[in-house]
Amino acid sequence: MVSNEPKQPDWPINVFVFKPEDDVQKIKDTIKPTEDPITHYEFNGQKMQTHNSDHHFSTKRYALLFAPGEYKDCKFEVGYYVQMAGLGKTVTGEGAVKFTGEESGPFVPALNKDMPVTKGGSIAQDNSGLCLDTFWRMAENFSSEKTQWAVSQAAPLRRVHASKQLMFGDGAAYSSGGFVANAKADGECNYAANQQWYTRAVELNGNVGGGAWSTVFSGCIGNVPAEGPSGQGDLVVTIEETPKVRMEKPYIVMTESGDYELHIPKATTEETTGAHLDGSNTEVRCFSKVKVGKAILPIDEKGNYADYDDDKYNVLTDADKNLTLELQEALNEGKDLVLSPGIYFLTQPLIVKKPNQVILGIGMATLIAPQDGSPCIRVQAGTPGVRIASLVLEASVQKGDFTEHANADKVRSLIDFGDADKAGTTDPGDASNPGLLSDIFTRVGGSNLDRTVRTDAMVRIFSGNVIGDNLWLWRADHVKLKPGEEPNDARFPRYHQVRIWEEKDGKQVRVDECIAKNAIVVEGNDVNIYGLFAEHTTEDQMVWKGERGNVSFFQCELPYDVNYEFSHTGYHAHADVETHTGRGVGVYSNFTCFEVVAKKGLSFPSKDKIKIENPFTVFLNGDGGIENVLHEGEEKIGDAVSAARKLARGWIGLGN
C-alpha cells in the first residue's frame, strides 16, 4: 500500500514561508542573507552601494514562499539561486499574493556597479554595473505595483501582474536573454538595454519600449509593438500572434487551512494568448500524493546552513545513493516530486515511467548527473503528460565505464525525454496531453572546481508532442576560481575563463575544460519550444531532426575557446527535415582564443515548409567573426560580422 505524504510539509531550513501577518521588517531581515551581498564604493565623490556577484557560484539554494495575502512595503532583492514564489491560487483578487506600495516586492538590479570600464570587458560605462551574468533566480505568482527585473538567462518572471511598471533593465547596464511569461502589465513595460528578450502570453496595456537587437512576442495581446524594424537602433520585433499550444508550469498553492496543493495547468490549443492568472483550466493535486525531496544540506559546527565542501563535491556517498533511491521509489509509487532547494548528487537517473507525473524543483534545486554517463532524468518513451520544471541540471565528473543506467546509445546527456531507439513515428506522443520541460537550466561547469566535467548533449528529445518553455543550455564560458587561483583573463577578475586550449611553453596544448558537444538534439516530431537559449558547446548548439518542429525565440553564443578547426553552427535543422519554423533567431560570436571565422550562424535545407523569421548574427567581441548569417541549402545568405561590422541580418520577416 502506498503511504500518504503530509499535506503540510516539514520544509528544510532553506525554505522560508512568510505570512501576511508577519512583521515586514522581520521578513526582510530573514531574506537579507539570501540576497546578493553589498559593496560600498565612491563615485564622483559620492558614497554609493551596489549588490555584487560574489554568490555567482554559491552552492547554497533558497526558496522564499509567500502565503496568500497583502504585504505592504516589503521590498527585497532576489539573489543567486533564490526563488520567490507566491502560494496563491490566483494572481489578483482574493487568495492572491499582493505586494502593495511602490517600493514593495521582489526586484533585481544591475550588479557590480563599482566595477570600472575595461577594454573588451562587459561594463557599459562607469557606475552602470551589468546584468549579463545575472543568472539562476526566479520570481512568480504575485502582483505588485512596480517590479524591476534586470536579468539575463535562467531568471524567469512568471504569473505576475504589475499595475504600474515592469522594468527589465537598469540604466545603461548590458543584459541579454531574458524571459517573461503569463503576465499582465497595466503600465510601462521596458526592455531597456537587453540584446534579446522573449515575452510569451503577456497582456500589455501600457507603453512598451527598449531592446537592442531582437524582441520576440508570442501570444501577447494589447499594446504589442509593431512587427519588423522598430525605428530605434538595430531592434527588430518578431510577432507570433497565436502559438500552436500552451502549457503553463505547475505551481504550489497554500489553502486557507494551511495545506499545500500542486496546481497543474492543462494543455490548450485554443487559449494560447494573453495572461491566464485566475487558476482556471488547472488540475489540483493534494500534497498527500506529492513527495517532497530534501537535499542533504551541509551544516557547519554552529548548526548553520553552509556551502558544500569543494574537496567533497565529486565524492558520492551512501547517503547520496539512498536519497536517489528514495526519490525513485516515490516516482515508482506514482507520486509527484517537489524537490526542495539544494544540490542532489545522483547515483543513477531518475526515471519517469507513469503518465502525467510532475517533477518540480523549488529554490533552484540542482541535480548533478550520475558519474557513469547517464542523465539526471529520463522520461520513458510512450509516457504522455509528464512535466519537468524549475530545475538546474549539472554535468559531473565522469568516472569509469558506462553502467546499466547509461543511455542505450552510450551518449552522455543531462536529460532524455523519450528513448533514442524510439524517436519520430515510433513515439509520437499525445497532442492532447503533451510533455513539458519548463524553466530547465543545464550547465557544464560552474561551481565544481574539477573542470573535467562533461557531457555529450545536454537535452535530448525523442518523444513527440513535447513543449519546451524557457530552456537555457549552457556550457560554461567561465567558472569558479580555485582557492588562491589568479584569473586567466584580467578583463574578468572574478572567474576563470574556460579553455579547450592552453598555451604551454609556446605551444597550444589541449586541456578540454567543461566539454559538451551539443546543447539540444531534437528527434521527436511536433516539438514546440518557446524560448531556447543555447550557448558555447563545441559542435552544433542545436540539432533538429524531428518534423513539424517550432522554435519561438533562439539566442545563442558560439563557443569562445575553439580554434581554427571549428566548422559548426548555432541553429541546425537537419537536411532530411521537411517542415520546421524558427522565429527571432540570433547567433553571436566572441572568439577569444583564436581568430576563428565561423562559416554560418544557421544551417537548414531550402524547402517550402521550412520557415525562418528574422535570422541574424552578431559580432560581440574577440577575434574573427561569422562569414554568413545562414546557409539555406547550398545558398549562402547574409553579410559577414566582424569587428568592422557588428550585426548582419539574413532577412527581415520570412525571407524564404
Image (cartoon, rainbow, N blue to C red):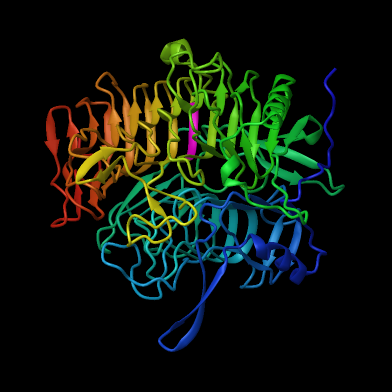
Q: Is residue 376 above or below residue 248?
A: above
User: Which quadrant of the rendered structure holds the C terminus?
Assistant: top left
* 16 to the left or right of 437: right
Q: Position of residue 40 (x, y in %)?
A: 52, 77
Q: Which residue sits at x=41%, y=15%? A: 424
**Quarter of the image where the N terminus is located:** top right
Residue 614 visible to an observer of this rendering: no
Residue lying farthest to the bottom in this orientation: 45
Q: Is residue 523 above or below residue 630?
A: above
The one nearer the camera, 656 or 48, is 48
Q: Main secondary structure of the magenta part?
A: strand
Q: Is residue 424 above or below residue 448?
A: above
List the single residue furthest toward the front. Answer: 505
Residue lying at 25% horizontally and 35% vertically, measured from the top left = 569
Specify start and end residues of the magenta stretch as a single range: 466-470
**Residue ID at (63%, 66%):** 76
Residue 493 in sight here? yes
Number of marks: 0
Give residue 187's position: percent from left, percent from top: 51, 66
Comparing 450 with 529, the one in front is: 450
Horizontally, residue 372 falls left or right of residue 330, namely: left
The image quadrant of residue 16 is bottom right
Please tell me which residue is depicted at 36% across the width and 72% down the height of the picture. 116
